[in-house]
Image (tube, helix red, strand yellow):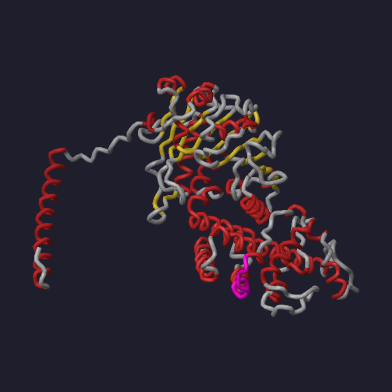
Amino acid sequence: MTEQKFLQDLEKKLWTSANKLLPSLDAAVYKHVVLGMVFVKYVSDSFETRRQELIAEFTDPENDYYLSDNADDEMVLEELENRDFYTEKNVFWVPQAARWKYLQDSIRLSLGSPLLHGGEFKGAGKLLDDTMELIEKENPKLKRILNKNYAQLQIEQNKLADLLDLIATVPFVHDSLKAKDILGHVYEYFLGQFAAAEGKKGGQFYTPKSIVNLMIEMVEPYKGRIYDPAMGSGGFFISSEKFIEAHNGRLGDISVYGQESNPTTWRLAAMNMAIRGIDFNFGKEPADTFTKDQHPDLRADFVLANPPFNQDEWWDGSLEGDARWKYGTPSKGNGNYAWIQHMLHHTSPNGVVGLVLANGSLTSDNDIRKALVEADLVEAIVALPEKLFTNTGIPACIWILNRSKVQTGKVLFIDTRDVGHFENRTMKVFSDDDAKALADMFHKFKTNSGYEDIAGKFYRATTDEIAKQEYILTPGRYVGVAEEEDDGISFTEKMTTLTETLSHQFKESDRLEEMIKKNLSGLGYEI
């Protein structure tokens, strides 16, 4: 079975089964119930994997951790509880009363039954809350991250137990896939499903993979500091990791910084990083990016984000005269240019910004838009197709801003509205090949190596040309219309064929109409 088929089957199994178990829960609540368990499964699996490695090392005379010929089972078990052996490998320490097997063995007990590691069973929800509390307590990096309100939700005990057993079926490995890859995939899949189920609110934390992958391919965050000031669940960081691995880079060469105002989403992002083993700095707390910047001194090498579209309630009186508004004070009724300038403020002298905004950003805030173009910060604008997002029909675009452009005085306009395919009736996606082809053309432009304008798709505009368009940045104004390929058939021939076809269709329509009337008449109905 291929990796893709394995993951697809796993997705279907988990989503279908989980929905059967908890059909009455709102998606916004349900995601925390499921993803909290997925996280515990991951840390427990990682812990158990390291535990088996240690057993092998303790009993191998050639290993530095060999315990001696006289070591008995009791000594081995004692050493296996030394947390240093786990933390040295960046494995979360999991106390005995929080390990997966203990959960499975305990979650179906009767109320009041004694627990193996002390206390009595007070319900499945309380058991899960205590598990999260223990893991957080033993791992300061996870402080305030895990969901601890299972008991409060008052979900039927047997339902929580069945869900736990379901998640337990997630296998450790498949061919070349590691446990973190499988569980990380499950985590991301559930996030996407919840985004679709929640509707508009889901878009606050979930960016379609098509968009993320394209931006990562264009920006190429190989090495340095990556920042997302509207990080949601951390999708850009995950894709950056995958990009680095695909290009034989080292994950240790990047450091990630993020900010998120929604407390639950902030926790989801931290869990997502922990599952992937990515070191992160998301600030001391969830907070508003504009009024309570968690990284005031950060100057990132790459800024990647999908901030809220056309945010109308972003302004605060304290932001008047803010140092971030270098190119002009943004509209108080629309946060698009506030996000742009915040990101530029946090970009290093050689840094690059990639962000998704509503198409309205290409024509609004005239003075700021003009200032950005004249400062030669705009490197590329990408018009995106409709139906890439699960939760909004607002037309969107990608901005690429660069503080050290090679192609000075020029902007690449890309129109992708005819790119991609429909994954289903409502959702359009870019394939990996689509993203690579678009990114390759951008890099050809960027390096001035083999780039050529293509009518209807790509156009390299000068600052003077943009000025003549009143600094409007809509790609359609520049790329023009694609030339239709000459098929060698004259207009007269085409019209003759079309009219003959139409005539036939009219006759067929008349025949069907008479047939329907006849059938209705036979049933006693006249038209």
Residue lying at 20% horizontally and 39% vertically, measured from the top left: 488
| Residue 111 on image: x %, y % | 70, 78
- The outermost residue toward the right is 70
- Check if residue 177 falls in the magenta segment: no
User: Could you tell me what secondary structure mostly forms the magenta stretch?
Assistant: helix
| Image vertical order of residue 447 relative to residue 2, above or below | above
Q: Quadrant of the C terminus?
A: bottom left
Q: Tell me if residue 154 is in the magenta stretch.
A: yes
**In the drawing, does residue 471 fall left or right of residue 227?**
left
Q: Nearer the viewer, residue 72 or 514?
A: 514
Q: Nearer the viewer, residue 219 or 157?
A: 157
* Residue found farthest to the front: 317
From the viewer's perspective, is residue 126 above or below residue 257? below
Give the side of residue 401 with respect to residue 350, left or right.
left
Considering depth in this image, is 61 or 217 the residue closer to the camera? 217
Residue 144, horizontal then vertical, whole percent: 72, 54
Does the image show residue 246? Answer: no
Give the magenta range.
Answer: 153-161
Q: How far across and how far down the image is residue 259, in percent?
A: 64, 43
Q: Residue at x 46, y 50 (%)?
A: 391
Which quadrant holds residue 99?
Answer: bottom right
